[in-house]
Structure formats: C-alpha cells, structure tokens
Amino acid sequence: MRLPALAAALLLQPPPPAPVPLGHGAYLVPRAEPPAVLFESNGAFVVGERGVTVVDAQFTAAHTREVLAAVRRVTRLPVRTVVVTHAHDDHVSGLQVWRDSFPDVAIVAHAATRDDLAGDYAARRRQLVADLSAGLGRYRALLAEGRSPAGRPIDDEERASYAAVVALGEGYLADAPAWRPTPPTRTFEGDSLALPADGTPIVLRHLGRGHTAGDIVVHLPAAGIVFAGDLAAWPVPLVGTTSFPAEYAAAVGRLRALGAAVVASSHGSPLRDDARLARVQTLLAAVQARTAAAVARGETLEQARRSVDLSDFRRAFAGESRVRGALFDAYVAGPAVARAHAALTPAR
Ligand SMILES: [Zn+2]
C-alpha cells in the first residue's frame, strides 16, 4: 500500500475502545458498532490484586487484542482467568488471543458451554465462513447501490448496519485460516462457582437455560455489578435459535433478583435500573404463553408463526427503526416461536 493511502486508512480507523471504570476494579470496554445482523461483544475485565479476570473474547482476534490493549492501559498484571459466558462466536472466536498471550490462563465455562463448543461449534464456524464468503459481496453491492435486498433505498441506519456487517465479516474471514479451537480448561455443572479470592469477590452464576444451555453471568456481589453476557442484550433481546424460551424468562427473573446496581450486557450500554430487564422478562413470558396457546389450539409451527402476534413487543423494542425491526424478526419473533413450539410439541 502506498504511504498516503495507508495514512488515509489509519485516519479512517475508529480509535480503539477505551476501558470504562465501573468501580471495584471492574471495567467495560464498549464496542461502537451499530446494531446489525453480526454482533461484536463489549469487552469486560476485573483487576484483582494478583491478576486480571476477563469476560469473554470477541468475534475477531483484532478486537480481542483491542480488549487486551485496554487491560494494559489499566494494569500490567497478567490475565489469569477468562470466563466464557456462552458458546457464541462473538464471545469465543478470539479466545486463542488470550491463550497465546497468557499460556497459563484458566478458561472457565459452564459444562453445557464446553459441550456446545465440543459439539457442532466447529461445523457452525465452517458454515459461517462459507456464508460470509458468499454473502459479503452482496452487502458491498447493496451499499454501493444504496438499496436494500428488497430494492428500496436504504436509510443512514441501514447503511451503517450493512457496513458493520462487511467490516466484522471481513475480520472473521481474515482470522479463519489460522483459527484453532481453544476449549475451556475448567468447567462447572452447578449453579455457581466462586473464583479464587483475589480482590473483589467474583462468583460465576448459571441462572438456568436461557439464551443458550450454558449461559453464565459474572457477579461481583460486593460491588453490585453483574456482567450478564447475552441475557440482556441491546437493541433487541437475543432469543435466537439456541435459546430455551420456556426457561429464559425465569433466568432473567433470577438475574433481576441479584439486585445489582449495574448490569453490563455484552451488547449495548450498562443497565442501571430494572426497567429493561423487566420488559425482556415480560417478552419472554409472552412468547411462551402465546406459543403455548397456539399449540393448545393444535397449530403447526407454520400456523403458529402466523397466529403468534408479537407486534406489541416489536414496537416497544424496535420503534420505527427498520434495522431494529429486522433484528427483532431475526432474533426474536422467528426463532423464539420456533424454539418454544418445538419444546411444547412432543416428538413424534
Ligand atoms: Zn450470544
């Protein structure tokens, strides 16, 4: 690359995310990507007296290294523990950055997350690489033409959203040739695990199945802080194809019952009151109840997809935004009704 072009590219790069102190040695490293079908996760870490505990890795190695750089702006202590909140790419794909940087690091997850990672995760990665290899060109073309897949002009929010998909997808594809599995080194099966004492006490809590089978939240009880993974995601709840709608509402209820003053999600700004979690719990309970009513009427999944009306929640979470509406359809309405319907329908 010629130097002027390189300088221009560097000028266009957003600055790396800075650590935001939450108190008691806890920090959030917020991502600035706009809502899009591909997500990147906020970084998070807790500085103890002898070492650092990190929450999750990122979707790309480069973004995981940005979190490491944010840690280094606060402390020279080694990262001793990485907690994996669940087995989704935007939380685990960059794990080898932590392993390579700190060979003795403990990678801690719930046993169900270990099983998810040992199960079809590698196949899902291969599928995503294939989908992105085939699909990013289409996003680039839509951006260049300024139109949506349906052919209408895109608005500024959609433009930013498509651009985020291209940038994140390109990063993921760039990582793919050198990517290798980085499994947890320690797992637990029960509902909680206290990490070894080192400064602010840290308790990992499995609040039941919800967003996935193995979600854990990172609770700092003395600080009133919880890192909640994807249980309280923004801008729409991430119910998704690996969720358990019947149990998800109860898991969010247990998260609320922790009574933390700050609930830091992997996506979006930290929650400092209970209102959004209450709304998420109400949505999840409604998905379950409305799908159960459809099943009780003898409806097939296709019939239930038409009859279960979540437009009240779509309005509440997405407002007039096309991007957020599309995310609600993709991550809530479609998969939630399907997962709830499958769980309520005895296998034949
Ligand atoms: Zn997730």
Image: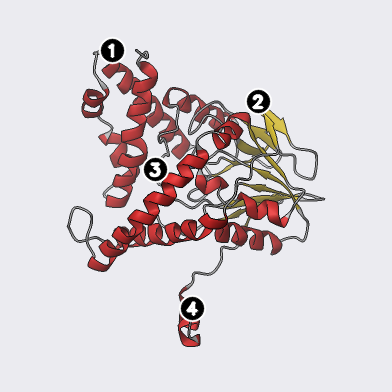
Residue placed most toward the observer, 236 or 124: 124
Residue that numbered label 4 is attached to = 11
Residue type, label 4: Leu
Which quadrant of the figure has residue 306? top left
Residue type, label 2: Glu
Residues at marks 3 and 1, CA–CA distance in whole angstroms: 28 Å
First in sequence: mark 1 vs mark 2 = 2
The answer, for residue 60, to whether it is visible in the render is no
- Residue located 27% across and 64% down the image: 141
Residue that numbered label 3 is attached to = 236
Of circles 3 and 1, the one toward us is 1
Image vertical order of residue 102 relative to residue 66, above or below: above
Q: Residues within 10 Å of mark 1 (few under 14, many from 20)?
A: few
Residue lying furthest front: 177
Q: Residues within 10 Å of mark 4 (few under 14, many from 20)?
A: few
- Contact between marks 4 and 3 (CB within 8 A): the answer is no
First in sequence: mark 3 vs mark 1 = 3
Badge 4 element: helix
Residues at marks 1 and 2, CA–CA distance in whole angstroms: 34 Å
Badge 1 element: helix
The answer, for residue 203, to whether it is visible in the render is yes
Residue that numbered label 1 is attached to = 296
Q: Is residue 237 left or right of residue 59?
A: left
Residue that numbered label 2 is attached to = 189
Q: Quadrant of the C terminus?
A: top left
